[in-house]
């Protein structure tokens, strides 16, 4: 999987036509985007608290049915000017699952997760006609997780941990038809600072329209985030992935 994500990031650089970078100019008009979105999550991995470890695997339909909350408190802000930008993305979810596997036993596993991504972007190349723009990304991710595992009819454990990890990546964005946008992003991080390794991929399409006198975009796509972190008995070796739906207002 690590090789796949690195290859995807490298592919973004290969699809840029040769010579285009010399003609590219940074985006001229400063913009500020506010995005509110929901993430319908499938879960696959292992969580640990103290001496207990549980395996969790759930489709996003099961997650919706079983979780305490699925899509609240998710948003992103990004400002760009002169080819450079800053972004902040925050997502919170509380997940609860019955009858998960904990060794030879069954258990209930509950996790509350807060993920905050922040960093900067730099425009590397662009077509000049808005069809594509290639950005480099660099930043950090703060993750806070509380794991609670209770063996059915047996012991339980509760542990919380927070960590920071750096990441780097690439993003291609642009317009492919009248009022239609796209964005494809891949990043890798951790490198033993925080997670042993982490990767993220996101692809969206958007339809632009006017809302309250502002330019708005309705978004649909798919997001995946994988982190492998452990500290003593605490473990968060999880891949979260699923559809995203949202709306962006541009100021």
Image (tube, rainbow, N blue to C red):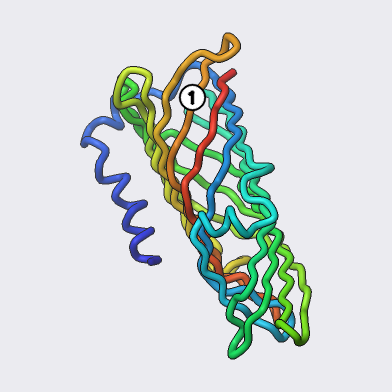
List the residue tagged with mark 1: 217
Question: Which of the pair 24/118 is nearer the observer?
Answer: 118
Relative vertical location of residue 122 with respect to residue 162 in this rendering, above or below? above
Q: Residue at x 39, y 34 (%)?
A: 205
10, above or below 29, in the image:
below
Q: Residue at x 60, y 76 (%)?
A: 100
Identity of the residue furthest to the left in this view: 18
In the rendered image, the quadrant that contains the N terminus is bottom left
**Residue 189 position within the rendered picture, expressed as x and y whole percent measured from the top left:** 52, 59
Label 1 neighbour load within 10 Å: few <14, some 14-19, many 20+: many
Which percent across, then down, holds residue 110? Answer: 70, 67
The answer to whether residue 196 is seen in the rendering is: no
Q: Nearer the viewer, residue 106 or 145?
A: 106
Q: Quick one: quadrant of the C terminus?
A: top right
Q: Residue at x 37, y 19 (%)?
A: 179
User: Which of the 4 image quarters holds residue 46?
Assistant: bottom right
Q: Position of residue 49 (x, y in %)?
A: 71, 77
Q: Which quadrant of the figure has residue 183?
A: top left
Instruction: Where is residue 67? Give x, y as percent.
Output: 65, 57
Q: Which residue is located at x 50 percent, y 43 percent?
A: 244
């Amino acid at each position: 999987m690590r090789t796949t994500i690195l290859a995807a990031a490298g592919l973004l650089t290969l699809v840029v036509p040769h010579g285009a970078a010399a003609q590219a100019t940074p985006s001229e008009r400063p913009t500020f985007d506010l995005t509110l979105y929901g993430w319908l999550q499938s879960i696959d991995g292992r969580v640990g608290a103290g001496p207990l470890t549980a395996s969790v695997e759930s489709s996003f339909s099961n997650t919706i049915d079983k979780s305490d909350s699925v899509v609240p408190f998710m948003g992103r802000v990004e400002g760009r000017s002169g080819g450079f930008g800053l972004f902040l993305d925050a997502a919170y979810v509380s997940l609860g699952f019955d009858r998960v596997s904990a060794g030879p036993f069954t258990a209930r596993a509950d996790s509350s997760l807060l993920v905050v991504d922040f960093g900067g972007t730099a425009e590397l190349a662009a077509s000049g006609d808005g069809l594509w723009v290639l950005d480099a990304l660099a930043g950090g991710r703060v993750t806070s997780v509380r794991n609670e595992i209770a063996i059915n009819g047996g012991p339980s454990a509760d542990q919380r941990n927070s960590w920071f990890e750096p990441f780097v990546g690439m993003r291609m964005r642009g317009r492919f038809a009248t009022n239609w946008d796209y964005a494809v992003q891949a990043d890798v991080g951790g490198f033993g600072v925080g997670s042993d390794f982490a990767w993220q991929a996101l692809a969206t399409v958007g339809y632009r329209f006017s809302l309250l006198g502002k330019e708005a975009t309705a978004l649909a796509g798919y997001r995946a985030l994988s982190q492998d972190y452990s500290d003593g008995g605490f473990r968060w070796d999880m891949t979260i992935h699923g559809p995203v739906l949202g709306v962006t207002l541009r100021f």
